[in-house]
Image (tube, rainbow, N blue to C red):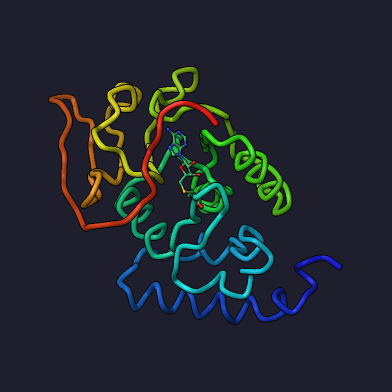
Amino acid sequence: MSRVASGVGMTSQRTRNRMIERLREQGIRNERVLSAIAGVPRHLFVEEALASRAYEDTALPLGFSQTISQPYIVAKMIELLLNGRELGKTLEIGAGCGYQSAVLAHLTKDVYAVERIEPLLAKAKLNLRAIQQFNVRLKYADGQLGLPEAAPFDTIILAAAASSIPQALLQQLALGGKMLLPLGTGEQKLLLIERQAEGFIETRLEGVRFVPLLSGLE
Ligand code: SAH
């Protein structure tokens, strides 16, 4: 039996609507972000045993010591990046199971996502195929180096916390582009970086908790 036809599938529309209401209460205002999130069946991205918890506002384990991001933080980060502009060509570092990639793919046609753990990348590929999301290009690579062959990017979003700003990513940000990353080792804060003709403008935002950005491939 397909998972969509199971009990989880039948209640998911209601629980999904509740998740959207909760995101509104938490302050997410951008309707495009809310409808992109509403359009992605999060339960298909988590382990079957956890599917009933897929619409709670929590990070859930993905395996390989990684987690699927909390819906609020996915919404908040994309809202910060959208803010009066289009996302344009977007690079996501840390695709994990592909959940956030799918949300991004609802908002812009060009999404590139890199992941350093090969079995997770394989999972992301299967998940995105299952929901027929074909506009995400997934690459097995160390995202600290960006994706030079597809640069420059209008938007770069990191799903893992960097201890310092990866220089390659700054170089691959287009003029007028925006990058958002969790920064820090113990305490982490979101950092928004905008590339303008006169240089990079940095804005420190709220505290967050992400898995660390690591080097090399696994
Ligand atoms: N975007 C994912 C979140 C996955 S958690 C989602 O929607 O669920 C963060 C991911 O970043 C992990 O899968 C981890 O393996 C990956 N990661 C960490 N360092 C990385 C690096 N240098 N390059 C690419 N991916 C990295």
Q: Position of residue 163 (x, y in %)?
A: 26, 37
Q: Is residue 38 left or right of 128 when viewed as pictured? A: left
At which x and y percent is residue 106?
54, 52
Residue at x-position 30% and y-position 21% = 171
- Measured as percent of width and height from the top left, residue 117 is found at 56, 36
Quadrant location, the C terminus: top right
Against 126, residue 57 (above or below) is below
- Total tally of numbered discs in the picture: 0
> Is residue 83 toward the left or the right of residue 205 in the image?
right
Q: Say above or below: 150 vs 48.
A: above
Q: Looking at the picture, tell me which residue is in the foreground, 203 or 85.
A: 203
- Is 180 placed left or right of 3 in the picture? left
The residue at the point 33 percent across, 27 percent down is 169
Instruction: Report whether residue 168 is seen.
Output: yes
Q: Position of residue 159 (x, y in %)?
A: 41, 46
Say which quadrant the N terminus sits in.
bottom right
Q: Decide which of 36, 146 is in the foreground and name it.
A: 146
- In screen coordinates, is 151 left or right of 61? left
Residue at image point 46% right, 27% down: 142
Q: Is residue 211 above or below residue 171?
A: below
Whether residue 189 is visible here, answered yes or no, is: no
Q: Residue at x 58, y 49 (%)?
A: 97
Residue sitting nearer the eye, 151 or 100: 100
- Identity of the residue furthest to the left in this view: 198
Task: Reply above or below: 148 against 119.
Answer: above
Using the image as rendered, state which of residue 189 and residue 23 is in the foreground: 189
